[in-house]
Image (tube, coloured by chain):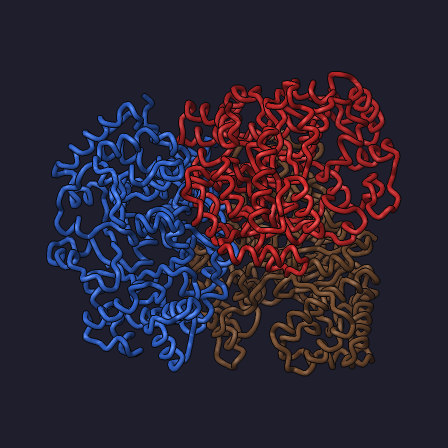
Chain colours: A red, B brown, C blue
Amino acid sequence: MKPILLHEDRLFPADKTTRDIARNLYQSVRSLPIISPHGHTDPRWFAYNESFGNATELLILPDHYVFRMLYSQGISLESLGIPRWDGGESEADPRKIWALFAKHYHLFPGTPSRMWLDTVFKDVFGMTDMLCKDNAMEYYEHITNELAKPEYRPRALMDRFNIEVIATTEGALDPLTHHGVLKGSGWEKRVITSFRPDDVVDASRPDFEANVLKLAEMTGENTTDWQGYLQALRIRREVFRSHGATATDHGHPTAATADLTEVECKALFSRCLSGQSSAQEQELFRAQMLTELAGMSVEDGMVMQIHPGAFRNHNANLFTKFGRDKGADIPMQTEYVNALKPMLDKYGSDPRLNVILFTLDETVYARELAPLAGHYPSLKLGPAWWFHDSPEGMLRFRHQVTETAGFYNTVGFNDDTRAFLSIPARHDVARRIDCRFLANLVVEHRISEDEAAELAVDLSYNLAKKAYKLEK
Amino acid sequence: MKPILLHEDRLFPADKTTRDIARNLYQSVRSLPIISPHGHTDPRWFAYNESFGNATELLILPDHYVFRMLYSQGISLESLGIPRWDGGESEADPRKIWALFAKHYHLFPGTPSRMWLDTVFKDVFGMTDMLCKDNAMEYYEHITNELAKPEYRPRALMDRFNIEVIATTEGALDPLTHHGVLKGSGWEKRVITSFRPDDVVDASRPDFEANVLKLAEMTGENTTDWQGYLQALRIRREVFRSHGATATDHGHPTAATADLTEVECKALFSRCLSGQSSAQEQELFRAQMLTELAGMSVEDGMVMQIHPGAFRNHNANLFTKFGRDKGADIPMQTEYVNALKPMLDKYGSDPRLNVILFTLDETVYARELAPLAGHYPSLKLGPAWWFHDSPEGMLRFRHQVTETAGFYNTVGFNDDTRAFLSIPARHDVARRIDCRFLANLVVEHRISEDEAAELAVDLSYNLAKKAYKLEK
Amino acid sequence: MKPILLHEDRLFPADKTTRDIARNLYQSVRSLPIISPHGHTDPRWFAYNESFGNATELLILPDHYVFRMLYSQGISLESLGIPRWDGGESEADPRKIWALFAKHYHLFPGTPSRMWLDTVFKDVFGMTDMLCKDNAMEYYEHITNELAKPEYRPRALMDRFNIEVIATTEGALDPLTHHGVLKGSGWEKRVITSFRPDDVVDASRPDFEANVLKLAEMTGENTTDWQGYLQALRIRREVFRSHGATATDHGHPTAATADLTEVECKALFSRCLSGQSSAQEQELFRAQMLTELAGMSVEDGMVMQIHPGAFRNHNANLFTKFGRDKGADIPMQTEYVNALKPMLDKYGSDPRLNVILFTLDETVYARELAPLAGHYPSLKLGPAWWFHDSPEGMLRFRHQVTETAGFYNTVGFNDDTRAFLSIPARHDVARRIDCRFLANLVVEHRISEDEAAELAVDLSYNLAKKAYKLEK
């Protein structure tokens, strides 16, 4: 059996001088509290603080990074226990699933999943041998046993992981029950929600009309009327803010924005509600709504996150059998310069607007995003996202963005994950890579070691807190 | 005169620790047999085993990498002896051509051609001084004399180069005469063909109709009938398989696929045969045919290679005078996510489908290709291709692909060349660069040295054999 | 207070062996004269040789790299003293503006501006502490006092900076008064103009018709007639050549070219002159004009620079208040392969044509530009431009371009600046980065140290002189 690597100096560059500087910088930030301002953990965990289930349930079933790789090598999702949407059968024995995963752990070298998983196995559960088919059951039993202990409950892990604040993401229609339970517990400042209104804004969804009607029920507004609909969104934002939210999130296929007249908005909204809208009309409506939501951010101060560029559920067969979010989302080319102009013309110079831009299309880092963020006071750049939330991805982000946008038009790290146990590992990778990048600038005499030390703390902690308005 | 460089440590990185690891890894793979599953050598060479001609004929005239660079610096193709299509005159004296090339050898530093040529000059012909105008004739005479010796005949070089298997590429209408000659010689498993049906699938070609009629003659099918045409393709695939083919190759301008109804297919096919089809109809027909050919791959198990993205024969003047393939093919932006969806929806989840994707547009590595190959079991990624078959190109490929697709969704190296003598040099560059990339992962503690050693062998030998079904 | 860094070894790579080679190469080129064949300095400076004003006027107000970064962090252009176009008020006290800039100098680490500014502060003015709020006034007074001395006048600085020749850029309607003054002064070969006809070629400008009429006045041609208009352009080119111009410059939104019939040209030109043209017609007219201008270059030998891809004045609010060129130009995706074909089909094989291509879209370096320049004798590649005129940007350019285009299809460095004092700093960065890139090739045994030494001189000096026909 091979040992888990997880070397103290992992991800630092080969050159000794640079590595020494990177290591020093990292020492000063490795133990800083974690700010997790954008993610997908389940608020239920923190509200009720119950034990997690078994190793398979916690570490494989929700991790589409893991099962997309296994699936790409011919392992069926059924055999991995992913539940069939259409009623077909899936493997139910978590031990069998874990064994299958362990047998194929050799597929992961060079991927961020391997480093995250090894970190969880070693740092959270104390394993020392690398997972393989021979120790699969030992791993399974050990992890599953540990999970039953009080020190592995969600709130204990929040403390152990030194997570100062974590934001979950809820749809506009979410009753926020679990965040409600947190109120008064002392945890309500540490576990906050974010407002993601895609379900009531994206008219291409089959449930759009139904969602707009639910919005009426929840707010008492007439949401079939354009102004009533906007007012209902304002009311929901207010409710989210009262559950800690400081940010909104928008996962549109493109970054398109629009600035229509009120008459045009009304007609377009009616058309979308009629269920007869074309794909173009739906795109225009999403575009108009980004501008409307920017206007609401100007009013209420919520930070607006724009996450465009994914072709969702690309694999038609898989979608039919298993539904959404099964590792089949594929990035597409994404344009920002023309797309954002209508919104920026309307609100981009308002000092109250704060927009954080993300991309899955790295070609825009140097060409579009850094020049935009290096100019507009309302724009900042989110970290390397999703497939690019990886050592190479983060390095490319810094190398391509820094010269034009500087550091202070970026916002620190987001883990963006539902894999709660991997959060420290993900922030650790980001901190290591940022220290590496800074060390390189020091060695090339582009910044001083003092400057690097300040920047390391800003990138690891301060910028996220400031950009997401988490300084209280 | 300067010496040829060709240092033992060439292409390894500067850092001593990393270089040592890269060198060790390389020692274990440098002598592995060469698998050359995709290329453009002439099967005639291996069938008849005759001597190659002179240095100019073998090393300059067929190498469009070489003459495109010379042409870009104002040297006419006529003076390089490239035959005029239109009957104009070209230089006929191979010595004069060689002298002209030698005089401009200083244009090549930093290009892969320079490393390939130097390797051929030194390792194949034993030269030690770098080519220049002063030693041009010495080079010419020495190489030309050597080529006359038995140990420079094609089959002797196959052994000397340790090429286990080489695939040539033939059009659907090729009679495969030379591969036929190889049958029973003991070489038929070592020199195999590949099926490239562009000439009978691409209705934008002026000879499309004539080609479809030839296809009828060769197969006895009524190829003006849609089903007869498809059946004829199946018959040709069968013939190619009987000449060793395990793979097909498709060099369309884009990656577009389509999934039309049979009625639509028939109408479109008729339209294309009529010679009246528009560019859009031709594109749609190519798109539909990729899906049809994927269906045939599902039936007969042939591996499907998709090579899109070249604007062929961009230089109109050159094309008029010299015809195709004169170094004037220029890459274009290429989209895969939407383009491949019709084919993937129909066949992408079938475990019998094996598609290898190539690109000339590096922007899709991290954005589209790695996410697609890291998900679909039917998709794997071909190596850095053509202009990117170079040290920097290969490094960019690994850096941008590995984190999302891993190593096992890639297929090792293709030399893709008609320059037979450069094949060992090209595989050597690929092995060095892969070892370098792996050494870097080791030094950064992302994989262990043991893992790197296994991966080095897989990338140099096993993956190509497996992906192209050459394991017998 | 922190010292200004400006280490002797800045921008060289960490690895000691590579750094030593880079340093050696750099020693042989650091003092070579500066060739500045494309820029935006004011010819008035060199014509009248008057003192520059104060520190703020010279170093902040004209530098949109500086104020775009400050603006992006919420500092208003008014407070930076940028004059309002619409008559609004702006800060008038240069000391207050300087203090504001100094207070925010911590925003610049990692940007090229920081290195350029530090070099100016230290090498030109002898400062040793880094600018900060505490030494702001000391800086201001010292620089402003120095500027009053004779040795800081423009011509003295030309000598001190060792600028052999500098090209300014003037519009087609510019009377070239200041260049006229230089005639006979002995400076007319050292300060030359370039011909930029965008104002009389771009029909989307509100002043297009008026400009075409002015062109008539200046040339005596009937410029409302297509042939008269072309003739007028030829006449202006002639005048520019008599003021030293060897090159033209074309800053179109795209690289589109066209090759219409004369009848179509006449109709399109009339339409554009009518003020009723659509955006498509304006684009087609610009496209046709690039081809016409290429034809004129074939006639008169002027080198043609194509600089496409900027979305000009993206920020509508800023434009309304402050006008053009306020740091709000944002790059867009730019296509070259199809765009240039009409021009290349017409003139691309003519040995008299010399076109230098630039881009703001790095994705085309390896995909389009290097393959085009590595084939067409008429095409060469300009250096990394604008946002990419930076250490990382230059490295990406060399890494992505060299393998396919070699070094001799590139043209050395352009500073492209109106910030006269930063010119040595900018060329110094380019020389350091080129030496670094070459040193890396040496260490990886891809080129010899001798070859690198020759290439370093070519990249720093010879190529620019040759490509811009400045060898007299």
What residue lies at 47% left-to-right and 58% top-to-bottom? C334
**Closer-to-camera residue (B125/A24):** A24
Give the side of residue C217 with respect to residue A33, left or right: left
**Closer-to-camera residue (B245/C305):** C305
Residue A417 position within the rendered picture, expressed as x and y whole percent measured from the top left: 66, 34
Q: Residue furthest top?
A: A150
What residue lies at 47% left-to-right and 63% top-to-bottom? C375
Residue B450 position within the rendered picture, expressed as x and y whole percent measured from the top left: 71, 32
Q: Quadrant of residue C9?
A: top left
Give the side of residue A155 with respect to residue A332, left or right: right
How many numbered marks, from 0 up? 0
Say if residue B448 shows up in the picture. no
Say if residue C375 shows up in the picture. yes
Q: In this view, does B278 lie above or below B133?
A: below
Q: In which quarter of the image is residue B446?
A: top right
Residue A67 position within the rendered picture, expressed as x and y whole percent measured from the top left: 75, 40
Give the side of residue C164 with respect to residue B140, left or right: left
Q: Is residue C126 above or below residue B110?
A: above
What residue lies at 82% left-to-right and 41% top-to-bottom? A83
Residue B26 position within the rendered picture, expressed as x and y whole percent measured from the top left: 65, 39
Q: In this view, does A52 lie above or below C112?
A: above
What residue lies at 38% left-to-right and 46% top-to-bottom? C389
Q: Is residue B57 above or below residue C446?
A: below
**Closer-to-camera residue (C209/C468):** C209
